[in-house]
Image (cartoon, rainbow, N blue to C red):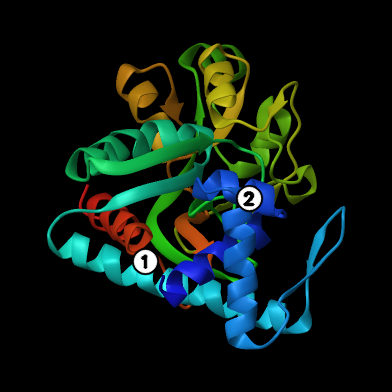
């Protein structure tokens, strides 16, 4: 049995928190996993784990060895995956977290195409507008829109999105069409709750001068699709990313207002924990999204 097998056995025990759970994962008997662990400690001449009836805990040497075993496993996997990628063969699990509407509108078809190109990849896509900690390790890739503030992460830009103020023709017929940003303060504005009310809406004229407006409105939501549907129903003015509005603008359900003004450009990023050994399947997925979105 190779040292890599012993390492994998040890990592499984630590990750699962017990020899029994590790045995289930490795499809071995508890006795076999325990024996491998003892043989590894004997070969190394150091105790890696302290054991009692309730739990296992890492020794100082165990902490050191575990971290390096994980790095070695990742590097071996990266090399294997790179060789498979060179042959057009990637395999394994990928987990991606993305905002609800952006995921549906911009990424779903691309992810399907990616899976068709790599039939041995198994992808779990989680769509959620709540904040997701990309450093937690729960996902291989997290899609973020807007400002990034976590230096622990690697962020690669996918594309820009542009915020547009829009309203339904029926709403504008009833309430009038604002001609300046300041007039928005007199209108029903549909607010995205992941941005503070106190920040208001900021629009820029063609000379780059900013106008900040404190908005009010009957409806707030943490999902752009909800705000878009409310705007189509004539409930007020919405400030939404262009990717959410394409179909509604083409159908005439919504119209852009204040065309002489622009809102802040927001960027869309693929974010993942900063690691020395990035799995090849993760790199290939992010490269695919970047190359496809930037020519779309």
Q: Estimate the x, y position of residue 113 in percent, counting from the top left.
A: 22, 39
Q: Nearer the viewer, residue 158 or 253?
A: 158
Q: Quadrant of the N terminus?
A: bottom left
Q: Position of residue 75 (x, y in %)?
A: 40, 74
- Identify the residue at the far right of this view: 53
Indicate the secondary structure of the residue bearing disc 2: helix
Between residues 46 and 241, which one lies in front from this camera angle?
46
What residue do we see at 38% from left, 58% from top?
282
Q: Secondary structure at mark 1?
A: helix
Residue 59 — which label? none
* Residue on which the image places disc 1: 77
Q: In the image, what residue occupies the spot 57% across and 66% down? A: 36
Q: Nearer the viewer, mark 1 or mark 2?
A: 2
The crowd level at tag 2 (other Cα within 10 Å; few <14, some 14-19, many 20+) is some
Nearest to N terminus: mark 1 or mark 2? 2
The label shown at residue 30 is 2
- Vertical relation: 14 (above or below) 188: below
At 58% from the left edge and 41% from the top edge, which residue is drawn?
Answer: 180
Q: Quadrant of residue 73?
A: bottom left
Tell whether 224 sits left or right of 251.
right
How many marks the image carries: the answer is: 2
Q: Observer-nearest residue: 278 or 214?
A: 278
């Amino acid at each position: 049995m190779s040292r890599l097998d012993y390492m994998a056995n040890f990592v499984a025990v630590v990750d699962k928190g017990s020899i029994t759970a590790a045995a289930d994962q490795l499809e071995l008997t508890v006795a076999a996993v325990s024996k491998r662990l003892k043989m590894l400690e004997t070969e190394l001449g150091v105790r890696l784990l302290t054991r009692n009836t309730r739990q296992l805990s890492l020794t100082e040497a165990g902490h050191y060895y575990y971290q390096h075993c994980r790095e070695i496993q990742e590097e071996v996997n990266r090399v294997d995956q790179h060789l498979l990628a060179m042959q057009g063969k990637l395999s394994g699990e990928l987990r991606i977290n993305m905002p609800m509407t952006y995921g549906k509108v911009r990424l779903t078809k691309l992810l399907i195409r990616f899976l068709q190109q790599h039939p041995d990849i198994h992808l779990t896509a989680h769509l959620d507008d709540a904040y997701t900690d990309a450093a937690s390790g729960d996902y291989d890739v997290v899609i973020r829109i807007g400002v990034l503030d976590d230096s622990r992460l690697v962020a690669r830009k996918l594309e820009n999105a542009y915020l547009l103020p829009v309203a339904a023709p029926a709403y504008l017929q009833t309430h009038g069409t604002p001609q300046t940003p300041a007039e928005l303060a007199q209108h029903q504005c549909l607010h995205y709750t992941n941005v503070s009310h106190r920040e208001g809406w900021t629009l820029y004229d063609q000379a780059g001068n900013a106008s900040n407006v404190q908005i009010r409105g009957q409806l707030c939501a943490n999902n752009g699709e909800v705000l878009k549907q409310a705007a189509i129903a004539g409930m007020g003015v919405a400030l939404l990313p262009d990717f959410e509005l394409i179909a509604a603008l083409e159908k005439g359900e919504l119209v852009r207002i204040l065309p002489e003004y622009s809102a802040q450009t927001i960027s869309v990023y693929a974010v993942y924990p900063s690691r020395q050994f990035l799995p090849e399947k993760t790199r290939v997925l992010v490269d695919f999204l970047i190359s496809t979105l930037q020519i779309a």
